[in-house]
Amino acid sequence: MAEAVSARRERWPRVRVEEVAQQGHPVQVLSELSQDCDLLAVGTRGLGGFAGLLLGSVSRNVISYSRCPVAVVRGRQE
């Protein structure tokens, strides 16, 4: 995770990013952690075609239960 955000940290050094690895159901864990966040970023697989327009169950539920704004980020297509 640290490697994935290292370039962003260099580009925006005043933005605090905290990586957290925790066991549990993703929706429950992320929703609980969101109470101490200004923004929660979650990934989505970004399936192609019509399916790509739909959010997965985790991202959809995190949006519903989060206590802060949520950014759903699609990964690069390979």
Image (cartoon, grey):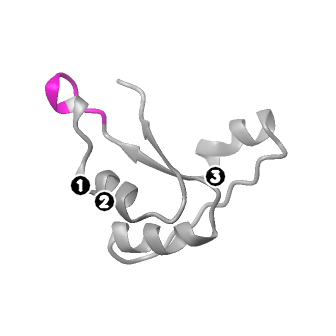
Q: Where is residue 36 in the image (x, y as percent from the top left)?
A: 63, 70
What kind of element bears circle 2?
Answer: helix
Which residue appears at 77% of the width and 47% of the height? 15
First in sequence, mark 1 or 3: give its number: 3
What kind of element bears circle 1?
Answer: helix
Q: In this view, does 43 lie to the left or right of 53?
A: right
Amino acid identity at mark 2: Asn
Residue behind mark 2: 61
Residue behind mark 3: 2
Q: Is residue 71 left or right of residue 7?
A: left
Q: Disc 3 and disc 2: Cα gap in Å?
A: 25 Å
Q: Do the residues labelled 1 and 2 touch (CB within 8 Å)?
A: yes
Amino acid identity at mark 3: Ala
Q: Give the range drawn in magenta.
A: 46-51
Residue behind mark 1: 57
Q: Which of marks 1 and 3 is in front?
A: 1
**Dividing the image into 4 quarters, which one contains the C terminus?**
top left
| Vertical order, 67 against 12 (above or below) | below
Which residue appears at 79% of the width and 37% of the height? 10
Q: Does the magenta stretch include residue 16?
A: no
Q: In this view, does 56 lie to the left or right of 77?
A: left
